[in-house]
Image (cartoon, rainbow, N blue to C red):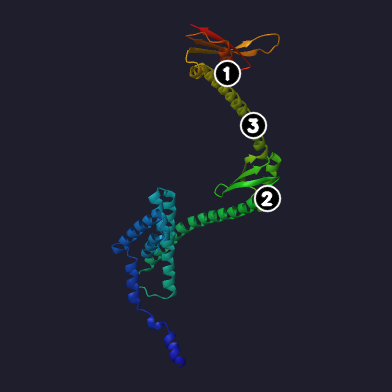
Amino acid sequence: MIATILHHLNLDSDLEHYDKIHNAIEQGINFRGTNLWILVFAIIIASVGLNMNSTAVIIGAMLISPLMPPLCTAGYGLGTGQYNYFIGAFYLFTINTVFIAISSVIISQVLNFPIRTPISDAQKSRINRWITVITVATLIPSIYFGYGLAQKEKFQQRATQFVGGIGIVEGNYLLKSEIDPAHKRITLVYGGNSLSEEHKQTIRGRLKDFSIDDAEVSILQGFSFSDALGKTTELDNLKGQNNQLLVALNENKRHLDSIKTRMVLGKQLLAELRVLYPQVTACTYAESFVYGGSDQPEMLAIVIVAYTGRQLKNSDEATITGWLTARVRAGRIKTYFDRS
């Protein structure tokens, strides 16, 4: 019973022959023919997927090539003209390729894969030297860039904590913050009361609490209540001046309307008088001022009624004068009758 279970759990039954494993690996790493075209198409598909922002296309490209992440970025850099992306991604691809190859050599030695082609000790030494040179040439820049990335991440983390602790300073509220880890620069935009130099120095003094006292802090004033109050007062003054101009314009408009009304009033009076007195031929209307003992002149309306035919009776003239007084609504009215 136990022997049967161990037989089923034995992995040696599925172990391929070393010759088949060697042929499969040799065909897979042969960088020409089908493999080269697959890599080319993978780059094209990845570039299209990244430009179209299509997840499905990118996943399809990843299924074609196991080295797709750096190749996707390289294709994106070429497609968008951002060559720093292309250089960085291709360098990452080189790192992956070198260390995958080194890992393959180490694993093959650990698993005691047989050497297919005998080589001399001189050739082995030369190969080992090349492996060492390539490894060191690849490893040293990666350590440098890795250290720089770690420093940027550390600065980003500490700067974020610093910004979180200075959200409110003496009645000022942090409206916006920007962190630039590459140049160790922090930009802060506040709104509220006007920030004094003492307040700004207090904010910069908090950098020591987060071990980033070498960072450059730029503090800007987005808006202040005092400035807003000054602008409000200025706006109220402008509104008052605007209202005064509107009153003056309305007054001028009423004056112009009254002038236009007086210009046509004589014509209207003529039309209305002819209904009662057909012999009336013309009507003159004018306004004047009478200056007397007082400082304020008195307005006087002057109406001249021209007619033909028989002489109007005194009662008719009195009727016309009374009607004109009620019709014109002037303080005083002087009526003249001209018979031609």
Instruction: Compare residues 148 and 89 and report the one nearer the observer.
Output: 89
Secondary structure beneath label 2:
helix
Residue placed most toward the observer, 315 or 118: 315
| Whole-percent x, y for residue 118 in the image | 34, 71
Three-letter code, disc 2:
Lys
Q: Is residue 311 above or below residue 145?
A: above
Q: Position of residue 4 (x, y in %)?
A: 43, 91
- Per the rendering, the mark at residue 208 is 2
Residue ID at (64%, 51%): 162
Q: CA distance from mark 3 to mark 1?
A: 55 Å
Pointers 1 and 2 in contact (C-beta within 8 Å)? no
- For mark 1, does the 10 Å Cα neighbourhood hold few (<14), some (14 to 19), or many (20 or more) residues? few
Write down the residue under mark 3.
Answer: 234
Marked residue nearer the N-terminal end (3 or 1): 3
Taking the image as shown, residue 256 lies to the left or right of residue 200, namely left
Q: CA distance from mark 1 to mark 2?
A: 97 Å
Numbered circle sitting on residue 323: 1
* The N terminus - image quarter: bottom left
Question: How many residues crowd mark 3 within 10 Å: few (<14), some (14–19), many (20+)?
Answer: few
